[in-house]
Image (cartoon, grey):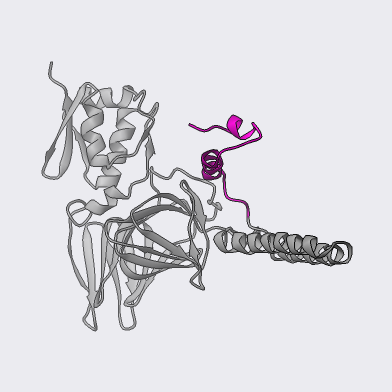
Amino acid sequence: MNTVNELESGNPSDEALEALFARAAARPLPRAERETEIREQVRVAWQRSVRRRQHRSYALLALAASVVVATTVGMLWYQSLTLPGDIRPVAMVDKRFGDVRIADASGVPYHPSAGAFALSPGQTIKTAGKAGLAMTWSNGGSLRLDENTSISLTAANEIYLQHGRLYFDSDPVTSNDASVRSGHREVLAIRTDHGMVTPLGTRYVTQQLNDSLVVMVRQGKVSVDGAGFSANALEGQRLQVSSNDAPVVVPVDSYGEEWGWIERTTPAWNAEGRTIFEFLNWVSRESGRPIRFESLVAEQLAKTESLVGYGLVDLEPSIALRIVLMTTNLDWTIKDGTVVVTERLP
């Protein structure tokens, strides 16, 4: 394996340079005035060189100048979505997988490096099949995108859902990044072609299809206002609006096949030092299944035993439930949609 020391030997190999470039972080985006300054410096250097040097040197400097300008322009293109200092990010991406495409308002694509990164107003996000994305919104809520979904970040408190479905948890335990929180908790509205979806301290799914809008509420209350109607959906309800028909509200479970995709987009959760009780609350919130303890002893064990050596749990919560509880003095089963926690038998 090539190292930095090899590069310092004075005769670095192509492989070593490639390894170094692969590890190098992207340069920050120059401001517009800095780009102008760079171009002016190149022009001045060019004119001075023309007066002093012969034709051969002239050609070499021309090549160098073109490289500097090309590098600057290329850097501006690749880093086109680095946020200027006067633009506040609206979200921080916590997790993404599959084919996720991000672009600015003019369609210029953004190719972020691995890890967390900020999103700004005006950007669009599209997920392909078997893809997904999770982000911490500026008010601290967690926003998830399912596969085959397209949205626009129209403002700090509004998203335009063009197609697909998203999930919003206004106060998650999975939110890992507070760097975009402003302290002012604005309501995040979801605009669709069928109406505006406005939550009130809630966890819910919004799905925009070609001819209908579906809202499912796990907790809280959601209002939907369209061209000729206004309706509400409460916890455990599913609201559907199709074409010009009146809204239809029916009961819905808080878990199951329609909610399963949310677990795939759950950001990694730091389990280190947390109690089993906290872990179970995380599983319940992400899966939608309530937790019930079979006995006071089982509940006390969950509240007093801590998880050590797990670090970040980057699994679907329902899968993590099976793996984590195997190493504890607790067992579990599912009865009528509820996770029932019991003491592990000897």
What span is colored magenta in the figure? 1-28
Quarter of the image for the C terminus: give it.
top left
61 or 333: nearer the eye? Answer: 61
Q: What residue lies at 37% left-to-right and 45% top-to-bottom?
A: 267
Location of residue 181 in the rendering, given as x and y in whole percent from the top left corner: 53, 51
Q: How many marks?
A: 0
Residue 325 shown left or right of residue 159 in the figure: left
Location of residue 292 in the rendering, given as x and y in whole percent from the top left corner: 20, 36
Q: Residue furthest left?
A: 336
Residue 243 shown left or right of residue 35 in the figure: left
324 or 101: nearer the eye? Answer: 101
242 in magenta:
no
331 or 318: nearer the eye? Answer: 318
Look at the picture and state if 316 lies above or below 207. above
Q: Residue furthest top?
A: 346
Q: What residue lies at 32% left-to-right and 22% top-to-bottom?
A: 304
Residue 288 shown left or right of residue 193 in the figure: left
Residue 187 visible in image: yes
Displayed quadrant of residue 150: bottom left
Residue 86 visible in image: no
Location of residue 32 in the rendering, given as x and y in whole percent from the top left corner: 69, 65
Residue 255 shown left or right of residue 86 in the figure: left
